[in-house]
Amino acid sequence: MKETKEFKTETKRLLDMMINSIYTHKEIFLRELISNASDAIDKRHYLSLTNSDIADNNYEILVEANKEERTITITDNGVGMTKAELEEHLGTIAKSGSKDFMEAVAKENSPEVDIIGQFGVGFYSAFMVAKRVDVLTKSVNDNNASLFSSEGLDSYSIEDASKDSYGSVIKLYLRENTEDINYDEYLDEYKIKALIKKYSDYVRYPIKTRITKYGENENENEPNTYLELETINSMLPIWKKNKSEVTEEELNSFYKTKFMDFQDPISSIHINVEGMLTYNALLFIPKKPFYDMYSDRTEKGLQLYTKGVFILDKCKELIPDYLRFVKGLVDSADLSLNISREMLQEDRAIKKIATNVEKKILSELSRILRNDRDKYIEFFNDYGLNLKFGLYENNGEKKDQLKDLVLLKSYNADKLITFAEYKEAMKEGQKEIYYAIGKTKEAVSKLPQMDLVKAREYDVLVLSDDVDEFMIQVLKDYEGINFKSINQGDLDLIDEEESKKIDELKEEKKSLLENVKNALPNVKDVVLSKRLVDSPCCLTADGDVSFEMERVLKAQHHDIKADRILELNPNHPVFTKLEATYNIDKELADKYTNILYTQALLQEGILPDDPQEFAKNLCDLLLK
């Protein structure tokens, strides 16, 4: 007898909301129904452990499309449902049979059963694409079959039916196409296969569908095509296998297929964690950055699975921004998902996984740095900028984890080295780690501030990226040894006697220095240099803002300037010429001063504010 009933506690408005608002993508319906089918098989298998009469050695899920009827059918040989269970679990929205089953298992202290469903709303996702859904089911508990039918409105019907085997058959009658939505696409063979591969590739039971095959046929009156059952899903994920069971070739092949790369990755990281928090992760460092890595429209994140079912393509919470180049996935049953299983709730578990994933990646990079320097240099040339930004971000929150992974160009060694290697090679008596800003070693070599450092044979780190000096400022020191810019502050590289002579000379030349300063309103001070040997002058920055920082901030439209200090070399013939000119012609001395200052600016890569004045002064002097 057919019974028509109202949905128990919810109204049409609530059902409409569940169908149309909970899920972001309509294609999710197939994932949800397949997950329910997998749960049903899990339950039957569990019950068969104590009742061999209901066991089945060939568990499977069948997905079929009928273009003529415009129907999609999902068949499983799982536990099935009684008429009462149909009313309880399908007739009441958000009443989860899977959740009840799990709670019952837990009360009995029975072995863990790994089922997917939690909320009891997945079935209703079918109404996103279907105008009517029929469920023909036969339960292992009472050996009777029933038919549930609903159009997703206010009511549903349940009636007795006939079915030979245990399990359920869910039949979806698709909605009519609209201008915006083509429901017929879900009837296409390639679409069904693609959705199974995308969302349910690692469901543990075979998911089969009927695939069109082509072949020769001797009878011209018969078609040369036929349908054949084919298993679509992979079932056992590679990341759930023991590391010892998976070869490097298999990992590389999986990576290239999964993430659409034609090159093997630099490295793969296989993580299996069991305990209070259980999860698997499989991570890859691509050989070369993907073309869109730095695009503003490209989201970072790892793929997220729960119990083998695909949930998110880009879970940004699983990986820090500076490691956005890492590809991979995480699979865990211990995550809090929202009711549609499309998004993560705020969860301690995801933070713990993310922290451990980050540690594993950095540990692998440390291993490569120790054991395969050439491979690490290749990696760093492509991704080193990311690590530098990671060190700088959040006021150096990650500096202790990242400082030994950073490489910078050594002036003396002419190669990339670590801070630890710089420290180990420091000269006797050297107290600080020196650095200079420049795109190349050759550019740094031409800086006048290098005179004294080169004379002492001290090494200098060449900072060539915009972020480098910001990173150094955050670090402040390495293992107690301070960083020192060659063009900021006092280098303290001359002996005490020479330093005393310059201090005394400063008093003697006080009038000249004041005149030079007065001629340069943009200069904070003019001093006699304790760092120059061969060059007549140089420009240094006073305070925390360097000339490089000024350039970077200016490019970001920040009007922040470094305080300029002009240093003059008292031992250079140009200084003697300047002083002599000052004594006889102060106006001409001012022109000399402006030319020297502009020279110092250009050496720092800074254009003068008034290039026409510089050109005029230069011409005037050439005519003298």
Image (cartoon, rainbow, N blue to C red):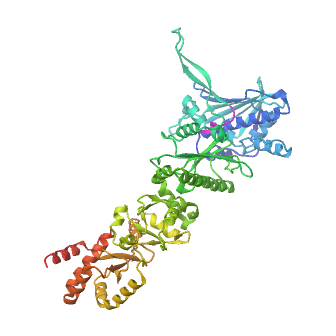
Please state if 561 lies on the left or on the right of 347 as rendered: left
Please say if 8 is above or below 537.
above
Please say if 283 is above or below 560.
above
Residue range of the region highlighted in magenta in the rendering: 198-205
Quadrant showing the C terminus: bottom left
x then y, percent, for residue 101: 80, 41
Please state if 489 lies on the left or on the right of 584 as rendered: right
Tag count in the figure?
A: 0
Report the residue at 68% width, 50% height from top.
335
Residue 171 appears in which quarter of the rendering?
top right
x then y, percent, for residue 107: 85, 46
Please state if 599 lies on the left or on the right of 196 as rendered: left
Report the residue at 29% width, 77% height from top.
536
Principal SS element in the magenta part? loop
Report the residue at 37% width, 62% height from top.
441
**Observer-nearest of 338 and 368:** 368
**Observer-nearest of 450 and 458:** 458
Residue 205 appears in which quarter of the rendering?
top right
Residue 416 included in the magenta stretch of the image: no
x then y, percent, for residue 211: 58, 24
x then y, percent, for residue 153: 68, 40
Please say if 582 is above or below 159.
below
Residue 201 included in the magenta stretch of the image: yes
* Residue 39 visible at all: yes
**Observer-nearest of 536 and 74:** 536
